[in-house]
Image (spheres, rainbow, N blue to C red):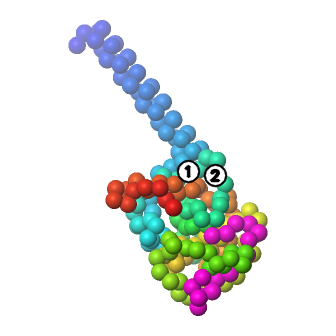
């Protein structure tokens, strides 16, 4: 290889390196400010989300609302990584849980919850049965109520919205379960 070919090769490699760095910077900015891909870890959101499903989580411009499936990061009990739950109430709302009837009531209205896995039983942990959600917080529950540590657990309780990483918008793996998250 002569000197001219070496220079062209170096310039070409330098060009590829610049392009790669540019792509990496754009990806980091997108994941930091707009959204990210995350995996579901556990069975607490079945049947809506399966264990090990991959989902797109939107961060930019998101304001928490009842019914949204969100990813949050708040250590409690033995849990320290991101968790996926559904918001059932926001700041100022009153939540009441009736284990005999298997219902969740928000501001006097029993929630219609076609997404839950099965009838709710009394959990194994010390639990909350009624709470007025503090402003700036949300009350979250898993769709698999009998296999979920959530806001009913006194060690988690109401979750400050600053712990929310984003709204789970779309499942894209496994392919058979892909689609928008309802």
Residue 71 place in picture, x, y as percent:
55, 60
Residue 144 place in picture, x, y as percent:
49, 76
Q: Residue at x 48, y 30 (%)?
A: 22
Apparent side of residue 64 relative to residue 145 in the rendered image (left or right): right
| Neighbour tally class for label 1: few under 14, some 14-19, many 20 plus, Cα within 10 Å | many
Q: Residue at x 33, y 13 (%)?
A: 8
Residue 108 place in picture, x, y as percent:
72, 78
Residue 153 place in picture, x, y as percent:
61, 79
Q: Quadrant of residue 129?
A: bottom right
Q: Is residue 114 magenta?
A: no
Which is nearer the eye, 80 or 147?
Answer: 147
Give the secondary structure at mark 1.
Answer: strand
Give the secondary structure at mark 2.
Answer: loop
Q: Residue at x 34, y 59 (%)?
A: 176
The image shows a total of numbered marks equal to: 2
Residue pointed to by mark 2? 62
Asked whether the beta carbons under mark 2 and mark 1 sit within 8 Å of each other, the answer is: yes
Which is nearer the eye, 49 or 115?
Answer: 115
- Asked if 62 appears above or below 72 in the picture, the reply is above
Q: Residue at x 52, y 78 (%)?
A: 145
Residue furthest to the left: 1
User: Residue 157's mark?
Assistant: none
Which is nearer the eye, 110 or 163?
Answer: 110
Start-end of magenta stretch: 88-103
Kindly tell me whether residue 155 is visible in this rendering. Answer: no
Q: Quadrant of residue 20?
A: top left
Quarter containing the N terminus? top left
| Neighbour tally class for label 2: few under 14, some 14-19, many 20 plus, Cα within 10 Å | few
- Marks 2 and 1 sit apart, C-alpha to C-alpha, by 7 Å
User: Residue 58's mark?
Assistant: 1
- Asked if 30 appears above or below 101 in the picture, the reply is above
Kindly tell me whether residue 44 is visible in this rendering. Answer: yes
């Amino acid at each position: 290889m002569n000197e001219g070919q070496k220079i062209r090769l170096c310039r070409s490699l330098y060009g590829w390196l610049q392009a790669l760095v540019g792509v990496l910077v754009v990806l980091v900015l997108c994941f930091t400010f707009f959204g990210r891909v995350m995996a579901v870890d556990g069975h607490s959101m079945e049947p809506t989300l399966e264990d090990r499903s991959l989902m797109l989580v939107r961060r930019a411009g998101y304001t928490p609302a009842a019914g949204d499936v969100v990813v949050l990061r708040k250590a409690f009990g033995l849990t320290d990584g991101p968790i996926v739950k559904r918001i059932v109430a926001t700041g100022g709302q009153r939540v009441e849980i009736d284990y005999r009837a298997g219902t969740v009531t928000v501001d006097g209205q029993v929630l219609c919850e076609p997404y839950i896995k099965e009838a709710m039983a009394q959990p194994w942990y010390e639990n909350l049965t009624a709470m007025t959600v503090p402003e700036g917080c949300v009350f979250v529950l898993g769709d698999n109520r009998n296999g979920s540590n959530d806001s009913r657990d006194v060690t988690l309780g109401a979750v400050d919205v600053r712990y929310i990483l984003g709204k789970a918008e779309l499942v894209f793996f496994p392919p058979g379960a892909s689609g928008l998250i309802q």
